[in-house]
Image: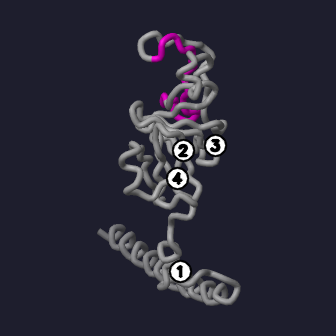
Amino acid sequence: MAGVTVDLLTDDEEEETLVSTTRDSGTFISGDSELPVVFLCSQCRLPVGDSLAWAGADPKDNVIYLRNVTKNILMDKEQKIDTANDSGCIYVLLSCRGCSLLLGRRYLCTPVHLDFKRNVYCLAVAYIESYVLGSTTSAELTDYNKKPVVLETQSEVLKELEKSQIVLDMMIERLSAVEEKILSLQGEG
C-alpha cells in the first residue's frame, strides 16, 4: 500500500509547496490537494478518519483537527481537566478500537481563545498515517507478464492442471513401487 505522511507546515513554508489551505495555524500536505486522504492508526492501520472531515492543523502541537471520525475511534468516558497547557480545558482521550493506541483528544470545554479545539477530534500526527486515494498508478497495478484468468483462458489453466495431476499420479505410483521394493528387501534381510 502506497502511503504518505502527514506534514504540517508553517505559513512561511506554505508558498514553496502544493498545499490545500486550512486554518491559518497550519497546512496539510497531501501531494495532490485534489485527492481525498484517509487517516489510519499507525499501529494497526485501521482507518480513523478522512480529509473530508478536515477542520485544520496545529504545527506547534503536531496535531490535525477533524470534525468527524470513524467508529474505529473510541472516546473515553472519563473527562479530564488540563490545567498545565490549555488553562482548564475539559477533554476526553481518543484511542483506536483495534489496538487501544492513544490517538489524541476531544475537547468538550475550552476557554475562548481555544474555541477552535472544542468538539473537534484532535489527532496526534505521531500516531496516525495517511493514504492518498488514487495515489497508485496503473503501472503499479498491472503486471504485463501475467494474464488474468478469464473464461477464455480458464480452459488452458484447467488443461495445465490436468497435466500436473497426471504427472503427480505417476510420481505417486513410482514412489509406492520404490517403497514396496524397500520393504521387500528389508523383509529378506
Identify the residue under disc 3.
Answer: 53
Q: Nearer the viewer, mark 2 or mark 1?
A: 2
Identify the residue position indicated by label 2 in the image: 22
Q: Are marks 4 and 1 in contact (CB under 8 Å)?
A: no
10 Å crowding of disc 3: few (<14), some (14-19), many (20+): some
Q: Which residues are magenta?
A: 86-102
Could you tell me how far apart the alpha carbons at marks 4 and 3 are, in whole angstroms?
14 Å
> Which amino acid type corresponds to the residue marked 2 in the rendered image?
Thr
Q: Amino acid at mark 4?
A: Ser
Q: Earlier in the sequence, mark 4 or mark 3?
A: 4
Number of the label disc, if any, that sits on residue 169:
1
Task: Indicate the amino acid at tag 1.
Answer: Asp
In the image, residue 3 sits, relative to residue 188, either above or below, namely: above
Q: Position of residue 89 (x, y in %)?
A: 54, 15
Give the SS element for disc 1.
helix
Residue 109, image x and y in percent?
A: 61, 16
> Separation of disc 3 and disc 1 at Cα?
60 Å
Viewer-nearest of discs 4 and 3? 4
Mark toward the viewer: 4 or 1: 4
Name the residue located 47 percent from the left edge and 17 percent from the top edge.
86
Q: Is residue 180 above or below residue 94?
A: below
Distance in Å between CA atoms under marks 4 and 1:
63 Å
